[in-house]
Structure formats: C-alpha cells, structure tokens
C-alpha cells in the first residue's frame, strides 16, 4: 500500500492482530510462520542493489531504515540452490 493511502486509514484498521483483551492469541505463532514463509520465498531469490552507487541516507528514528534504497530480486540460479537441503 502506498504510504499516503496507509496514513489516511483509521488507527484501528492498522492493528492487524487486534488490541487489548480481545487481541489475537495466535499472533506470535502467526509472526513465526510469516517469517518461515518469507524465508521460503527469499531463498529462491538473489537480491542486489538497484543503484550500485547508492550512498546511505538514514530515515526514521525508532525503526531506522535506508532512505531511497531499493533492491532488485532475480530468480536464483538452480546450481546455487544445490546444497540447501533440496
Ligand atoms: C496472520 C495471521 C492472523 C491474523 C492477521 C489474525 C488476526 C486476528 C484478529 C484481528 C483478531 C480479532 C482481535 C479483536 O477482536 O480485536 C484475532 C483474534 C483471534 N485470533 Fe488471530 N490472527 C491470525 C492468526 C491466528 C492464529 C495462527 C491463531 C491460533 C493459532 C489465532 C487465534 C486467534 C484467537 C483465539 C482469537 C480470539 C481472541 C479473543 O477474542 O479473545 N489467530 N486474530
């Protein structure tokens, strides 16, 4: 979702697992499985910098991230997948 569209949503819509007494009891389990699923996707992909000349600009405070940094994903070659338990 685009950042501007996300910012316009009501606060309650941004709590994916609910909140307070009725918050999702399976949220930690769900997060763990989300990580497992993400790794399952990423292990088939090679990531490289979209701009090789990128110079770090830090954005944010509590969750710092590189500003304007993009990566390109390409399908990993089959020979590189060997030895990964397949
Ligand atoms: C991505 C996965 C999941 C999402 C997005 C999600 C989201 C939610 C949301 C929005 C609620 C309602 C909270 C409220 O009423 O305010 C909820 C409740 C609940 N979820 Fe999940 N959930 C997920 C996975 C799971 C899993 C894996 C389990 C169990 C293993 C689980 C068990 C529950 C239970 C038991 C409730 C009712 C809690 C209560 O009303 O006391 N959820 N979930």
Image (cartoon, rainbow, N blue to C red):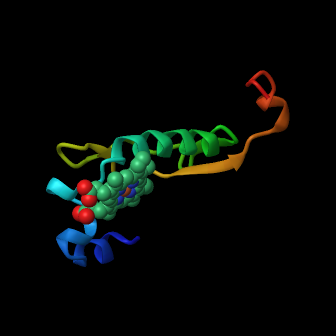
Residue 42: image quadrant is top right
Q: Is residue 39 left or right of residue 11?
A: right
Locate the C terminus by quadrant.
Answer: top right
Above or below, 66 relative to 14: above
Q: Residue at x 15, y 55 (%)?
A: 20
Residue 9 in view (yes/no): yes
Q: Residue at x 65, y 37 (%)?
A: 43
Residue 57: image quadrant is top left
Above or below, 5 relative to 59: below
> Is 21 in front, or is 30?
21
Residue 9 x %, y %: 25, 76
Determine the quadrant in which ligand 1 lies: bottom left
Residue 49 x %, y %: 55, 44
Farthest residue to the top: give it: 83
Q: Is residue 48 left or right of residue 80?
A: left
Q: Is residue 15 left or right of residue 69?
A: left
Above or below, 46 relative to 59: above
Q: Is residue 79 left or right of residue 36?
A: right
Residue 36 x %, y %: 54, 39
> Is 57 in front, or is 59?
59
Residue 68 in view (yes/no): no
């Amino acid at each position: 979702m685009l950042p501007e569209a996300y910012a316009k949503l009501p606060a309650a819509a941004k709590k994916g697992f609910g909140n307070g007494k009725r918050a999702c009891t399976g949220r930690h389990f769900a997060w763990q499985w989300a990580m497992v699923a993400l790794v399952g996707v990423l292990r088939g992909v090679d990531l490289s910098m979209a701009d090789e000349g990128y110079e770090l600009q830090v954005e944010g405070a509590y969750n710092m991230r590189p500003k304007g940094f993009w990566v390109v994903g390409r399908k990993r070659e089959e020979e590189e997948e060997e030895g990964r338990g397949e």
